[in-house]
Amino acid sequence: MESQTILIKDTIIIGDEINKGSILVEDDKIAEINRNLDSNDADTVIHGEGKVLIPGLINTHTHLSMTLMRGLADDLLLDTWLNDHIWPTEANLKGEHCYVGAKLACAEMIKSGTTTCNDMYFFMDQVAKSLDESGMRGNISHGMLDMGDEEKRKAEFKESLRIIDKCHNTADGRIKVSLGPHAPYTCSTELLKWVRKEATQRGVRIHIHVSETEFEVKNIIETYEGRPFEYLNRIGFLDDDVLAAHAIWLSESEMEIIKDKGVKLSHNPTSNMKLASGISPVSKMLDKGINLSLGTDGAASNNNLDMLEEMKIASLLQKMNNFDPTVLKADDVFKMATLGGATALGWEHEIGSIKVGKKADLALINMKAPHLTPYRHPISHLVYSANGGDVDTVICNGKLLMQERELLTMNEKELLEDAEETTKDLLSRS
Ligand SMILES: [Zn+2]
């Protein structure tokens, strides 16, 4: 088969250094980065003047299908939010809801420069279908919880293995599957030990929520005589294939455990602020050399999936928390949203930076706008001034997913109507 080429011409490339140049994409990979690439031979030519080319952003903690619950319940205590609104709605979820919700999330992510996500939810083969059709890359996991119930536990094992068998390494390698125990307070020790064993045997990764609230930490201390990461370490659960979301309430010794075991973290500042869960000691952990990435969490607690906005909020929150404007600099948080995310998902050799030979996962951001003028320092503008609406063109796995803000893998107008109808159906069941 003839190879397909895309040339992005005369742009600012955010690679190891920031340079003006052109970039040639051949099939799924970055084939050449050069100052003067000839446009004659490329199948598609994209003009990059006045724009900046970044690695596709990597959102390491999502619940994509929750886009259908966007704006459903705000300004509530976590308990009330979950018990009275989110869980009753989730009880009525069907595969079709999750498919459409995830498709809506894909549209939103592509339109704001994200090419890879790490998703935990239900009906994950439907989520995989949305990711596949949209052209995105994703690591998915069935969210497991047993609350100590053996019957429920067995059902969770079965569903997790079904999703691995059906979806792992599909869509030309764009979709991988992890095991997704929800959290140490909703999963029994038996469940967590099973996850550890299966993950090692099957070579899949683990995605879990840990220490999102102070209440959860107290609960674990009372039940297991140790803080969450101490308990997880004691039962042999932790390794460098574990990605823990939130990780807010941490002791010094837990930070040491995270570092020693090479555990990856996903920081979710907007969700943490909106639910008033607490502030993760991110800048302190970066200084310790812990691998940190960035995630939005679900759209019901954010309420969008805009990683450009998330970068700014992450940086501002750390500055305020430390009363120190020099912490979590623009460069640091940009790295969390790109290579840090790739590393968190074990994908650092393929994505997360712009290098010859890596997968062509790229986003082109338009810098010609009043809120981005004058324009001198691209990373500063990306983190502090830009938002998802400035993303012009997106490529994932060498395929154009959006050009000049037009989605190419889906009909946006029909999708929005479909999402409204699907939400109506979901809410009418409650
Ligand atoms: Zn979450």
Image (cartoon, grey):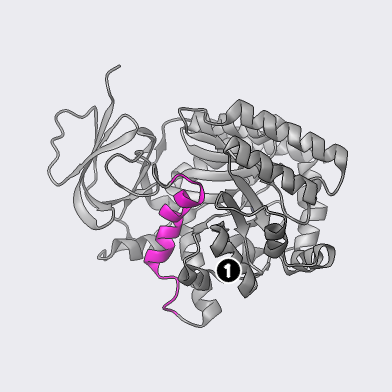
User: Within 10 Å of the Cα at label 1, are there few (<14), some (14-19), or many (20+) other Cα atoms?
Assistant: some
Q: Nearer the viewer, residue 357 or 22?
A: 357
Q: Which residue is mark 1?
A: 256
State the extent of the magenta-drawn residues as a range: 325-347
Any part of residue 212 in sight? no
Residue 339 inside the magenta-drawn segment: yes
Which amino acid, mark 1? Answer: Glu
Q: Residue at x 46, y 65 (%)?
A: 312
Q: Above or below — where is 180 with respect to 330?
A: above
- Residue 172 pos. (x, y %): 45, 27
Residue 322 inside the magenta-drawn segment: no
Please give the count of numbered marks on the rendered protein. 1
- Residue 422 pos. (x, y %): 68, 34
Q: Secondary structure at mark 1?
A: helix
- Looking at the magenta stretch, what is its main secondary structure? helix
Q: Residue at x 80, y 67 (%)?
A: 225
Q: Nearer the viewer, residue 328 or 289?
A: 289
Q: Residue at x 52, y 39 (%)?
A: 138
Q: Above or below — where is 16 with respect to 153?
A: below
**Horizontal placement of 114 versus 297: left or right?**
left
